[in-house]
Image: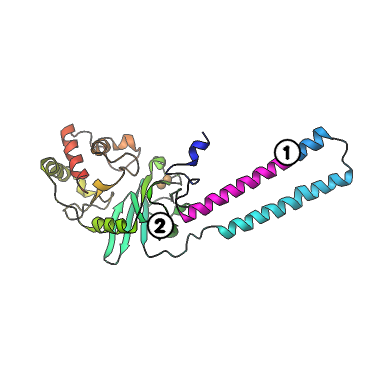
């Protein structure tokens, strides 16, 4: 069970970036040092109580208490502390240019990529170029959340009305999982996100596509889905750039069909996941603000799903 947590896309022990590597090294050294100390201490304890209870002189015993109980821990723990502080990643260090602002919501993530042409708005997913240090600027809408991508680095709290910074670099392309790491209400555990570290060229192409407005519905089912989206008032909360839907309450859906997950990491992103999410939001994510649209017949849910999945 312990070893099962050592790898995978959400493990601090399976680093895929510079900062996470430093933290994994620190963890390994600290655990190893603690294990050695624990073994020495218990070995000594066993020796003086069981193997040779009477052989120790008063002077040696006093020396052990002072040396082993005060001096050695001071020196060793002091050295480990100094070493740990010296290699600790600087969460504020300057990036290579890309700034991504992330705001914690109940229970999802509002994401904005800063570009010279203005912000590119997205949600519940982070994409970043491999080999480049990215500056994350974090805050929160109402309560404290914590932004954590274990494969890439340490966590950073997100506060309402106060900005915090986190600097991360991914060194291996791949898809990782981020998770809110601060209890923030009923669905805290369901507040996750996918992180895709891409080759820089692929990232640039993706960002250009993400900046573009949504394309028109492709085919009959998608067109019907768009009508249902309008009829049910979905645009009151969700924005789809390039359409009349301009809501700012919920996640931007302009390119929701190209994301890896739905409901902030709650479901996958297959067609049926869209209809499942729309009909069962409150079951899937207790306390979520989006009401369940379980009154819609399945064919309407499927058409809505087709429209949203088509927003590539
Ligand atoms: Cu957001 Cu826990």
Reply above or below: 246 against 297: below
Left or right: residue 176 versus residue 55 is: left
- Judge by depth and name the residue closer to the eye, 247 or 173: 173
Reply above or below: 254 against 296: below
At 44% from the left edge and 42% from the top edge, which residue is drawn? Answer: 8
Q: Which mark is residue 138?
A: 2
Disc 2 element: strand
Q: Which residues are magenta?
A: 16-41
**Which residue is denoted by mark 1 in the rendering?**
42
Residue 59 pos. (x, y %): 88, 47
Spatial CA span between label 2 and label 1 = 45 Å
Q: Kindly tell me whether residue 193 is visible in this rendering.
A: yes
Residue 202 pos. (x, y %): 30, 56
Residue 236 pos. (x, y %): 21, 49
Reply yes or no: does residue 57 show up in magenta: no
Quarter of the figure with residue 211: bottom left
- Judge by depth and name the residue closer to the eye, 16 or 190: 16
- Judge by depth and name the residue closer to the eye, 263 or 53: 53
């Amino acid at each position: 069970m312990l070893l099962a947590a050592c790898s995978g896309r959400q493990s601090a022990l399976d680093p895929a970036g510079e900062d996470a590597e430093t933290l994994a090294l620190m963890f390994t050294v600290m655990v190893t040092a603690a294990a050695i100390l624990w073994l020495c201490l218990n070995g000594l304890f066993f020796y003086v109580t069981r193997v040779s209870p009477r052989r120790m002189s008063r002077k040696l015993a006093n020396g052990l208490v002072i040396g082993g109980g005060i001096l050695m821990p001071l020196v060793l723990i002091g050295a480990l502390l100094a070493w740990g502080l010296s290699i600790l990643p600087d969460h504020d260090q300057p990036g290579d240019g890309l700034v991504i602002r992330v705001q914690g919501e109940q229970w999802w993530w509002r994401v904005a990529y800063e570009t010279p042409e203005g912000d590119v708005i997205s949600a519940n997913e982070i994409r970043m170029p491999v080999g480049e240090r990215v500056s994350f600027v974090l805050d929160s809408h109402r309560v404290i959340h914590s932004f954590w991508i274990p494969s890439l680095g340490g966590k950073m709290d997100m506060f309402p009305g106060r900005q915090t910074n986190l600097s991360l670099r991914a060194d291996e392309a791949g898809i990782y999982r981020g998770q809110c790491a601060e209890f923030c209400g009923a669905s805290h555990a369901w507040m996750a996100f996918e992180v895709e570290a891409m080759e820089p060229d692929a990232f640039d192409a993706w960002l250009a596509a993400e900046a573009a407005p949504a394309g028109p519905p492709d085919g009959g089912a998608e067109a019907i889905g768009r009508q249902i989206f309008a009829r049910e008032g979905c645009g009151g909360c969700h924005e789809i750039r390039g359409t009349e839907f301009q809501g700012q309450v919920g996640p931007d859906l302009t390119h929701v069909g190209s994301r890896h997950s739905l409901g902030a990491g709650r479901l996958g992103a297959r067609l049926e996941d869209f209809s499942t999410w729309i009909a069962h939001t409150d079951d899937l994510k207790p306390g979520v603000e989006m009401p369940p649209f379980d009154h819609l017949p399945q064919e309407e849910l499927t058409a809505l799903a087709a429209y949203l999945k088509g927003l590539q």
